Image (cartoon, rainbow, N blue to C red):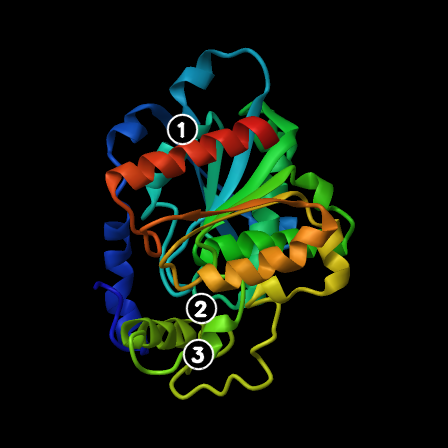
Amino acid sequence: SMFPNSITPDAIRSFRPQVALMDRSPDDFLAKCVCDALDFDGPAFGAEAQRIKVSVFLPRRLSYDVGLRKAQVWFHGGAFIAGSAEAFKRSCGKRAVETGTVVFAPDLGTAPETSALNRIHNGEASLRFVLSDRVADRFRIDRTRVALSGEGSGGGAALGVCAALAQKSEAALVKVCVTDCAAVNNDFITVPEAGSEDLHKAFQRLVMDSAAYLITDNAVGFDWSGHSADPAVFPGLMAEALLPKLPPVALLTAEFDHFRRGNEMFAKRLKPHGNLIGMYIQPGCGHALGTPKAEQEKAQVHRRLFDLYL
């Protein structure tokens, strides 16, 4: 209900402060983490952004371990046009504690100020920053056990970064990619017929408009022809030759998520290449919305994935 009724520049500005309300994770997870804030020179790591902020969430129980630690670089959601690591800090703390990993959450930038391609560049630069001596040595990160993860538009960015690495034959930098309700495909460009899906149709139209800001700064009446197959916006449409080069991928979505069908389409493409870990469809839930029981079930899935594959 907090999603704007129209995606205009004024609506974006009013929507952004409300995004933190989407983070329904309990506060007590933050108390179980040692939190830190870093920033780095973006161009030095291949990004366009001059400075990129990275929030760090280290589970306190890991601070007593003497060995190397597993890590994940997590990209926030926010319908492409909003969101930040700060807005989702409780979710980051929860993810760190539940998976036993150090979570690094960079600010990728939001549309229209940051384009689709630049978000991917910023995400790749953030991964390389985490793997650098400055960060990996300080937090005792095992460079062979680093995951990419994200939800919503951030999940799409995580797959986009994997595709960019695959193009450079560097996908091995990522041991596993885990996405939640990710925006990966262009299936919502084709709006369903009216009828029982009227609400779903309206929401898809809004998401389509917000995604347009990844390409243009004037999305009102944007013509998708010529852009609807852009893999920078829709990583699920990446070239077939890149699919076998991706790291292992796990796709999590929800029964009533408007991105579910896109995830199913991408899973179908990926499965023949042997690097699809699996696809988990959470019953009875919508996009980023779940009951406390559903959140517990999803936490169990996360824990198992990171225990087995990271």
Q: CA distance from mark 1 to mark 2?
A: 33 Å
Under tag 1, what secondary structure?
helix
Query: What residue is at 36 percent from the left and 61 percent from the top?
Result: 82
Under tag 2, what secondary structure?
loop
Q: Quadrant of the C terminus?
A: top right
Q: Earlier in the sequence, mark 1 or mark 2?
A: 1
- Residue type at mark 1 is Glu
The residue carrying mark 3 is 217
- Residue type at mark 3 is Asp
Q: CA distance from mark 2 to mark 3?
A: 8 Å
- Give the percent coordinates (x, y) of residue 308: 58, 28
The residue carrying mark 1 is 98
The residue carrying mark 2 is 113
Q: Are marks 1 and 2 in contact (CB under 8 Å)?
A: no
Q: Kindly give the residue lying farthest to the left in the view shown.
A: 1
- Give the percent coordinates (x, y) of residue 159: 59, 54
